[in-house]
Amino acid sequence: MTRVLGWLAALGLLAGLAAGFGYAPREAVQGNVQRIMYLHVPSVLTAYLAFALVLLGSIAYLATRRPGWDRLAGSAAEIGVLFTGITIVSGSIWGKPTWGTWWTWDARLTSTAVLFCVYVGYLLLRSLIDDPEARGRYAAVVGILGAVNIPIVHFSVKWWRALHQPSTILGPEPAPIDPAIGLALFVNWVAFTLLFAYFLSRRMEIARLEEQT
Amino acid sequence: MPANWGYVIAAYGIAAAALFGYWRRLARRAHAIGARPRAAAKTRAA
């Protein structure tokens, strides 16, 4: 199953590159730099998914004390940090030619940086506790509290005056984008979700084997 | 608007390096776990 997911993710990423660089047109205002969107937006959506699974795994672990839920939370957090890092770096690179700066303390950027730091802290906490039961319990509490930041990140562009544009695809109105751009974004989002599923499957299996040895 | 391909290549290049690096890290850890029980079995046999 994991191997199949890996191949599907690889094919999806190739299709995403073809859609983003071959099929989608050059954006009229920003030019080619807008193609970073096909990396930036799927990354952050994947990170949201990962941290939602951390929340689910944390709540379920506290309720049942089954180690599988803790493995899910810990594995998803690690991959979520990876995708949040990609989101921040790709956004920063996109920001330089469009905003004229690599970084600004805008509400969306700042809350995303806080999200990244919270889950890096979550992983550090896990690495510092040897007892699996105590590690699972403390990490679950941080995993639940950390999830509070996800809606703050998402709605920050609505709640505060921000340089970052409002949500295009997860907003309340229909997405005002060209259908070809929307399709390329969708293909890349599916590819990133498959890649996340592949990474999660492998990481959870490694965690299970590490607990046995 | 200039082409700005350098920014696009930088963003995709860094992301590809990060994802490939994580994939390699998982592969190394899986390999290490696979090697551990074999090493232990060899020690027991000896």
Image: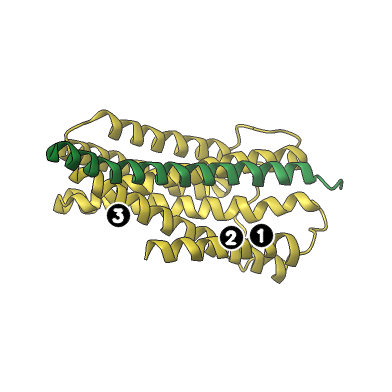
Chain colours: A yellow, B green
Question: Which residue is more in the foreground, A124 or B22?
Answer: B22
Quadrant for the N terminus of chain A in the image: bottom left
Dot 2: chain letter: A
Q: How busy is the neighbourhood of tag 1: few (under 14 within 10 Å), some, or many (20 plus)?
A: many
Task: Return the residue at label 2.
Answer: A13
For marks 3 and 2 on the same chain, the one whose residue lies earlier in the sequence: 2
Q: How busy is the neighbourhood of tag 3: few (under 14 within 10 Å), some, or many (20 plus)?
A: some
Quadrant for the C terminus of chain A in the image: top left
How far across and down, in percent of the image, does residue B45 sit?
13, 41
Quarter of image, res A191: bottom right
Please tell me which residue is depicted at 81% across the width and 53% down the height of the picture: A31
Which amino acid type is shown beneath numbered disc 2? Leu
How far across and down, in percent of the image, does residue B46 sit?
14, 36
For marks 1 and 3 on the same chain, the one whose residue lies earlier in the sequence: 1
Which amino acid type is shown beneath numbered disc 3? Leu
Task: Return the residue at label 1.
Answer: A17
Q: Is A194 rendered above or below residue A161?
A: below
Q: Secondary structure at mark 1?
A: helix
